[in-house]
Amino acid sequence: MGNVVPLIHTATAIAAVVFLILKAKVNPALALVLGAIYLGIVCGLGAERTLELVNQGFGDLLAKVGLLIVLGVLLGTLLSALGALEKLMALLLRILGPRFLPYSFAVLLGTGLQFIFTDVLLVMTAPLARSLGVRIGPGGAARIAVAMAVGLEVGVTLSVPGVGTLALAGLLEVPLGVMLLYGFPLATVTITLTLLLFSALIKRGFWKPERDESPAAPEETAPSAQALTNPAQARGSLCPPPLALSLSPLLLAMAMIATGAFSAVAEWRSPLVGFLSDPVAGLLAGVILACLIARRHLPKGTVGDAFGQGYRLSGQFLVLRGVGGSLAAVMGAVGLGGIVEGTVASSTWAPLLLVWLIAAALHLAIGSVITSAITAAGILAPVAPSLDVQPVLVALAAGAGSLFAIHATSNTFWMLQALLGQTTRGALKTVTMSVSAASVIALGLIQAVSLMS
């Protein structure tokens, strides 16, 4: 089969998925499965082989990252119940003041708070962010909106434990400790530079409050959604734990995961270190510690409520990510990976740019940051060893590319628009333009790291 035919069929399958989701209002998971089946059959794989690949791609992805996602969501739900976020933001506001709050807020969203499921984190922080917007001076609403959009989306694909980052590391076989070692500073610098850029633009009249901000109040569902994700709020806290204790499960998990990367660099290997630095062990330790703290300081039944909420969130999330793996598996089987490999082989001058372009093109077509990152990684997995760059940089370049041009197909776009009181025009500035700028900035930083390594 020529190179053109798989590309045409792939483009048709992606266009069909977009149509089913946007126009026919078909559930995204079902639309992705149908797109994968169509692609396999029209490319000559046959019905039986296509269904086998759909199952295999789903299972392979969840086998690599499923337990990590579940444990991460549970830890995030428990941290929410402990009120860690509200205490941390209050402390930052006191220490840093309103001027630097957007930067610290965005970096927190994009790094440590990625343990919390993205939609839940957005709903939890949006009312707080909107109230802070009026306290940080002119253009405050725009600056805090950019901080939220960039922090949330960059963290998903560039920083451990962002779920897209977990999937990229799993598919490209990058140790999570290494991904954390590279991704944490990359996400932090990318977020900071993007906010500096947009703060300068806002000062020069880029933001028009009369046209970009909506006079309507945030949706009344936000407080109830926040209560739903914070069982302790609904029940009332007995004795709220101090901030350091509330954050200790998160810090423990991150420290254990990071130990693996540092021990590998120091060539310090032992069975005990290997066990303790395993991401599953780190997240499990964090969940256990969070349970112990919650049982001591929160009302009876709060831990059970938090686990129930975590199971509901992780179940929905696992299905969507799994079917993204199904589509990636079929794309690889129809020869798309070979086409990409040939392109890379003939253009070795900028392999990371090509990786970024592939992920960006997939995101423009599919509209989902995480699904496009997973699909790109699935295509690139067989090609990655042939690239003359570190696998972790390939994973990060795919993650950066998948951030480009978030638009109306993204649920996060509309949630940010509604919860932060923006018009669609305003959201195009604070979400689409800002996260696209972060995507390009991240690529530049990754290229710089590649040249130095």
Image: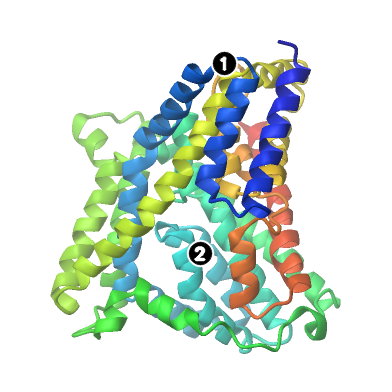
- Residue 428: percent from left, percent from top: 75, 65
Image: 301 above or below 397: below
- Residue 278: percent from left, percent from top: 29, 39
- Residue 91: percent from left, percent from top: 43, 80
Q: How is the image coloured?
A: rainbow
Image quarter of residue 74 = bottom left
Question: Crowding near pointer 2: few (<14 within 10 Å), some, many (20+)?
Answer: many
Image quadrant occupied by the C terminus: top right
Which is in the foreground here, disc 1 or disc 2?
A: 1
Which residue in the protein does label 1 denote? Answer: 45
Which residue in the protein does label 2 denote? Answer: 109
Which residue is pictured at 58% across the width and 82% down the height?
130
Q: Nearer the viewer, residue 66 or 108?
A: 66
Q: Which mark is residue 21?
A: none
Which residue is pictured at 43% across the width and 62% down the height?
113
Give the residue type at disc 2: Leu
Q: Nearer the viewer, residue 36 or 25?
A: 25
Image: 150 above or below 82: above
Q: Residue furthest top?
A: 1
**Does residue 412 appear to the left or right of 241 in the view shown?**
right
Image: 209 above or below 67: below
Give the residue type at disc 1: Leu
Image quarter of residue 77 = bottom left
Q: Is residue 173 visible?
A: no
Local secondary structure at mark 2? helix
